[in-house]
Image: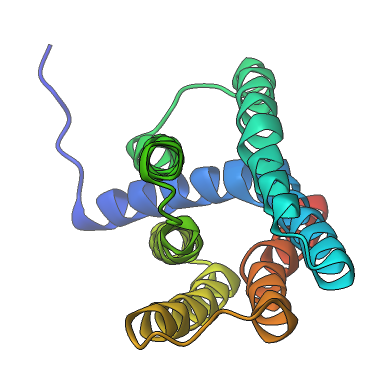
Amino acid sequence: MEEKQLTEKESLELIASMIARTKTRYLGSRKMLMWGYLVVITAISVWVLVASTHNLVWNWLWFAIPLIGFPTTSMMSHSQQRHRGATSYSDKVTSRLWTIFGISEIVLIIMCLGFYLLGETDCSGAILVYSILMTSGAEIAQGLIVRENCLIYGGIIGLLVGMITVCCIVGDIPLNVNWYMPLFILAWIVTMIIPGHILSNKEKQQ
């Protein structure tokens, strides 16, 4: 059977429909809100406990994020997969962006834990920098793919906070809990929670 050649207009309409379908699948993603609230709640808990007790042992609470987040994400992905149809190319690109981030974050956490256990070297700053920069970069990329400005703008703000963090670490400026934690929390609210709610409202309207 001879394949039908698409006209330029039909090709553009096909691309637009794929973007729209991907946008519908990722709009208001419960994963985005779950990660946003998980990080913010954990950060507030660490901030309050460290500031009030002056005991850095409370920093171990950060490990609650991957221990809760990754299994929850896996369960949400399986549930979401049962309710959606065929996967488009843009679906795969967006999904793999976050998969790469997740795997590399796990590797970094293990490496930092190894440095601490073997040589008592504190590499926690690397986790802070990497999580902010990679999350923001992946969100900007996703925003460009599905053409959602709130993802792009939120990602840019997160990227700026990540750059500030890098400059502080390189310049030997201590990331004091009383000024850095509010900035870190604000970055995650703007990067994940606010766009998540905006997209959730759009999804309900559709």
Tell me which residue sits at (53%, 75%) in the image.
Answer: 158
Farthest-out residue, top: 1
Identified at 36% across, 46% down, the residue is 14
Question: Which quadrant: the N terminus?
Answer: top left
Query: In this orientation, which residue lies closer to the viewer: 205 or 174?
Result: 174
Residue 159 x %, y %: 45, 76
Give residue 189's position: percent from left, percent from top. Answer: 72, 70
Going by the image, does 4 lie left or right of 159?
left
Q: Quadrant of residue 78?
A: top right
Residue 180 location, quadrant = bottom right
Quarter location, residue 72: top right
Residue 123, compared with residue 22, is above or below; it is below
Q: Position of residue 22 (x, y in %)?
A: 50, 44
Q: Judge by depth and name the residue closer to the eye, 6 or 61.
A: 61
In the image, 123 versus 31, the foreground residue is 123
- The location of residue 71, given as percent across then percent down, is 65, 24
55 vs 87, left or right, is right
Is residue 42 visible from the viewing direction of this image?
yes
